[in-house]
Image (tube, rainbow, N blue to C red):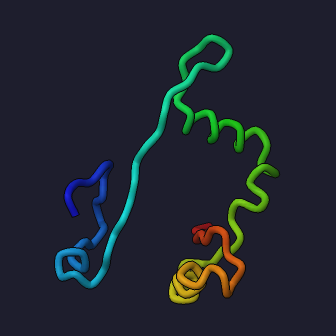
Amino acid sequence: MVATVGNLQGVDLSSLWFRELRLTGSSMYAGSTLRGQPVRTYQMAVDLLARNPRKWDGLVSHLFPLQDYRQAFQTAFAKSRHCCLKVAFDLR
């Protein structure tokens, strides 16, 4: 782990230090112009999906409650077997 973006309070990162877990992440976005105004493309996508929640359909193929994290990771790691596009946790 080289650096972090954001606030990670309450997250135990010791498994990274002891090489029990590999973490790969990214934090990228671009800018564009919308109706003559500068806008971040990430914000454009969030606004679009907020206006029309049906656009989310198909983006997440598997949704798990947090207590089923083992099954969620097994599904994510065997995408072709589970016909998996994206796995997410339902924290509601």
Residue 67 in view: no
Q: Residue at x 82, y 51 (%)?
A: 54
In the rendered view, tell whether residue 14 sits above or below residue 51: below
Q: Quadrant of residue 10?
A: bottom left
Name of the residue lying farthest toward the front: 80
Q: Position of residue 9 (x, y in %)?
A: 28, 60
In the rendered view, tell whether residue 42 sits above or below residue 55: above
- Quadrant location of the N terminus? bottom left
Q: How many numbered marks have been drawn onto this rendered protein structure?
A: 0
Residue 37 in view: yes
Name of the residue lying farthest toward the right: 54
Q: Quadrant of residue 15?
A: bottom left
Q: Residue at x 55, y 38 (%)?
A: 42
In-front residue for pair 67/58:
58
Q: Residue at x 70, y 60 (%)?
A: 59
Q: Quadrant of residue 79?
A: bottom right
In the rendered view, tell whether residue 56 sits above or below residue 1: above
Q: Residue at x 30, y 52 (%)?
A: 7
User: In this image, 35 relative to 15: left or right?
Assistant: right
In-front residue for pair 53/67:
53
In the rendered view, tell whether residue 68 sits above or below residue 5: below
Q: Position of residue 23 (x, y in %)?
A: 34, 69
- Quadrant location of the C terminus? bottom right
Q: Position of residue 47 (x, y in %)?
A: 66, 36
